Image (cartoon, rainbow, N blue to C red):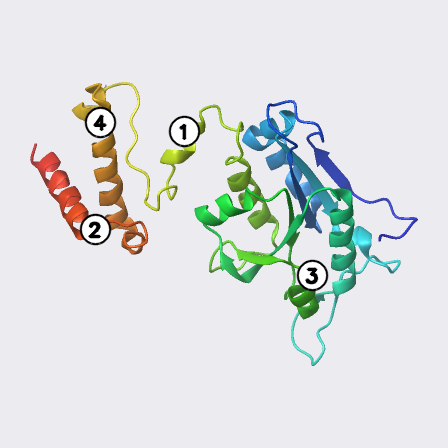
Amino acid sequence: MPKKDTAITVIIMGTATPRYGGGAPMNITVLTLFPAMFDGPFGESIVRRAADKGIVRLQINNIRDYAKDKHHSVDDSPYGGGAGMVMKPDPLFDAVEDARRSVADEPSHVVLLTPQGRLFHQAVAAELSEKRHLVLICGHYEGVDERVHRYLVDDEVSLGDFILTGGEPAALAIVDAVVRLLPGVLGDPDSVLGDTFSNGLLQHPQYTRPPVFRGWEVPQVLLSGDHQAVDRWRRRKAVQRTEERRPELLGPAGVSQEELADAKKTSEDDEAN
């Protein structure tokens, strides 16, 4: 628990009682050293609308408020020597345990944001969106004490094979990706079905008005009104684009050699016309 004379920094968006249809809101708690980084992104757009609807309840807690010394220290030098500082276990354990108590009626899933974690992608976003209380720990410095890895967290996630100054940008991205998958967040629930990676492939090309812009025309099939033909065109284009830009995704997405050949032939025919 935090010190009694310390005011805990908590930013809460959303309500415990949903104003949108359905059950109780999803709870997301972010543990960070820099709560102000979340003010702008979480105060705008889809995340804010989801909170206003009561679909999600966001809480941002300052890890430093759980430090036990007068300087609010959250890091220390590593045993055995070496460069940099390591986040101490006691403020993190206290912060997570406090977060769990704040949503005591829901199971908590604690995720450490670290470059050593499993790679975040759309399937992971869908998995995390099923959790009732998601706790995200934003790492910093040279990492966290190993006892946090072993005895505190349920999961470890990385945004990619690169290094950030802290876990806050990763938390922003993960919350956005998770929240948009919650029922009732997007105006058209089918819109997530066509997203890039939703079916394992990159998204097909998109067009809107005008039908001709600077001499570049919208493909006629999209103007035909034939929904089955449009669906076939979009699938072929998604396969084609994925083969060109992310070919490693084709196998896991279940694209056969025959389908790939058909997509390539269709592309060649389009160019010839």
Q: Which residue is mark 1?
A: 190
Q: Earlier in the sequence, mark 4 or mark 1?
A: 1
- Disc 4 vs disc 3: Cβ atoms closer than 8 Å? no
Q: Position of residue 18 (x, y in %)?
A: 66, 26
Q: Which mark is residue 256?
A: 2
Residue 163 coordinates in the image, percent (x, y): 53, 60
Question: What is the C-alpha distance between the residues marked 3 and 1?
Answer: 37 Å
N-terminal label among 2 and 4:
4
Residue wearing tag 3: 152
Tell me the residue at 22%/44% (across/down): 240
Question: In terms of secondary structure, where does tag 4 sit?
Answer: helix
Percent position (x, y) of residue 35? 70, 44
Q: Residue 228's mark?
A: 4
Q: Is residue 271 left or right of residue 173?
A: left
**Residue 75: x and y, percent?**
74, 64
Residue 176 appears in view: yes
The amino acid on which the numbered mark 2 sits, given as a three-letter code, is Ser
The amino acid type found where label 3 is placed reads: Leu
Which residue is at a point 75% across and 44% down the rendered structure image?
104
How far apart are the two marked residues, 4 and 3, measured between alpha carbons?
Answer: 50 Å
Left or right? Give the position of 203 relative to 149.
Answer: left
* Dot placed on the residue nearer the N-terminal end, 4 or 3: 3
What residue lies at 92% left-to-right and 48% top-to-bottom? Answer: 5
Q: Do the CB atoms of the residues marked 3 and 1 lie less than 8 Å apart?
A: no
